[in-house]
Image (cartoon, helix red, strand yellow):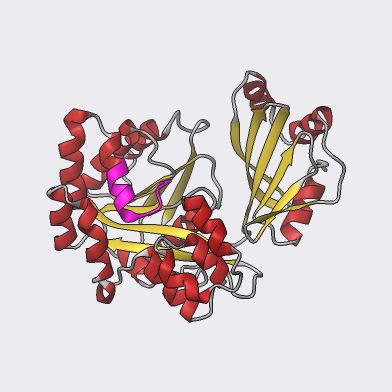
Amino acid sequence: MARINAFLKLGREQGGSDIHLAVGCPPLIRLHGELQTIKYRNLSDTELEELVYEILTPEQKTIFLSGQDLDFSYEHEDVGRFRVNLYRKFKGIGASLRTIAPKIPSLTELGLPSIIEKFLHTNQGLILVTGATGTGKSTTLASMIDWLNNNRRYNIITLEDPIEFVHKSKQSLIIQRTVGTHVKNFAEGLRAALREDPDVILVGELRDPETISMAMTAAETGHLVLGTLHTTSAVKTIDRIIDAMPTMQKSLATTFLSQHLKGVISQKLVRTADGRSRKAIVEIMINTPAISRLILSSKVFQIPSSIQTGKELGMQLMDQALLEALKNKEIDPDDTYIHALDKKQFQRYITNPDLLPQINLAIN
């Protein structure tokens, strides 16, 4: 058994979301959003290399030794499944290992709004799940795919870098492909997927103009496309897509979004009230006729007002979602304040007054 498994097992047993290994410091576990040190000696360059090289295939080791970073999945019956990023830094190598839950949670188990399930009743268009790294986008997407797998007879193709949750075909046929192994990149994977009779295509990341363009083509030609972006709100998501496109294609992207974007789910993970876990809090935008007109007329900055007044349709701004969860005593008030955009309305809930000058100082 690989020696690194001891750290991975400890991290999973303690409920950690990530395990970090870096030269010059002991192993670290991210527990409920905060890094905790494992009682162990500082890792040397040689020791860390020995730990991570044990879980690499010969091909992966060759790629890493050539100077490239590595993204891959690691699974062992004793410790479960992990998403691994292996990299180099100033003093040596480093590794970040994200724990993957052994069971795909349902949308209900994640506590996500019912409107997300309603998104999945459409059979074409683009649905985006966005948020910063480590905010649970992959888990939400896996839950969405699992719902389709249980309720629809679809051919579902996923393009991931790397594969995290492993789906077993149920009502649907699930084809999972890894970028860099099964396809060269997301754009080529999308191009190939369109020749494979798909109903649904999951794109792990819309990271470049070519991938975005191919995803648009797939959505326009009668497919349901699910994708992710590292943006933190619906408005920033729309702006990012348009800004990413070449000048000659910006107007086409704007028209596409106004017509084929079904919705944007932007999420954050906020510490729960008991401090024992984190809860996904989501901003939801539905592309209503009113919002479609705002996109088409380049008035994206007005979209938050439409989201704020569209609660009866299932829409909500991040601050609205945070406030509701806070009033329901589901999340920690101090962590809520840190995540809020308009912090004034959350100040009266703070239990740690030291946060106020710290936040104000950071803003100034």
- For the question of whether residue 135 can be seen, the reply is no
- Is 85 displayed left or right of 345 in the figure? right
> x, y percentage for residue 77?
74, 52
In the current view of this chain or complex, which residue is farthest to the top?
66
Queried whether the magenta region covers residue 230, the answer comes back as yes
> x, y percentage for residue 94?
69, 34
- For the question of whether residue 347 can be seen, the reply is yes
**Which quadrant holds residue 203?**
top left
**Which quadrant holds residue 271?**
bottom right
> x, y percentage for residue 358?
56, 57
In the picture shown, does residue 291 fall above or below 156?
A: below
Q: Where does the magenta region start and end?
A: 229-240
- Is 252 displayed left or right of 132 in the figure? left
- Is 13 displayed left or right of 163 in the figure? right
- Which residue does the image show at 66% across and 56% down from the upper left? 34
- Which residue does the image show at 35% across and 37% down from the upper left? 190
- Which residue does the image show at 48% across and 49% down from the upper left? 132
In the picture shown, does residue 51 fall above or below 39?
A: above
User: Closer to the camera, 187 or 205?
Assistant: 205
> x, y percentage for residue 279?
54, 67
- Which residue does the image show at 14% across and 61% down from the upper left? 289
User: Closer to the camera, 83 or 242?
Assistant: 242
